[in-house]
Image (tube, grey):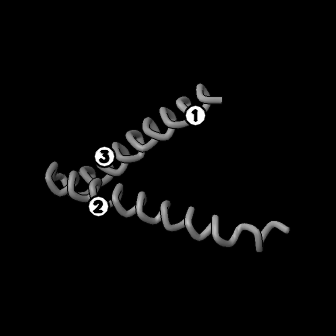
Amino acid sequence: MLDTKWKTLAKTLTWRCVASATTFTVAYAVEGDYKKSAVIMAIDTTAKLLFYYLHEELWNRNAHRCFK
């Protein structure tokens, strides 16, 4: 079980890196500026982490209503 949790954590972290790199690449293609692209990537990553956390909290509080 612990091995599965470490694999899940590793997959989560590597996916976050891929997603952030994608955001940076698209932002650079649009803006043509490394600094702006890095700022966009940082804002995007922070926002997605925050929204994911809020989603999980709401889900955990209300899942029993959806799945009876």
**Across the whole image, how many numbered discs are drawn on residues?**
3
Question: Label 3 vs label 1: CA separation?
Answer: 30 Å
Percent coordinates x, y for residue 36 in the rendering: 17, 57
Q: Quadrant of residue 62?
A: bottom right
Depth check, mark 2 against mark 1: the one in front is 1
Q: Which residue is mark 1?
A: 5
Q: Quadrant of residue 46?
A: bottom left
Is 11 left or right of 29, judged from the image as shown?
A: right
Residue 25 circle label: 3
Q: Give me the residue at 43% from left, 38% from top.
A: 13
Percent coordinates x, y for residue 47 in the rendering: 37, 63
Is 41 left or right of 1, judged from the image as shown?
A: left
Q: How crowded is the residue under tag 1: few (<14 C-alpha within 10 Å), some, or many (20+)? A: few
Percent coordinates x, y for residue 19 in the rendering: 41, 46
Q: Earlier in the sequence, mark 3 or mark 1?
A: 1
**Three-letter code for the amino acid on which mark 1 is drawn:** Lys
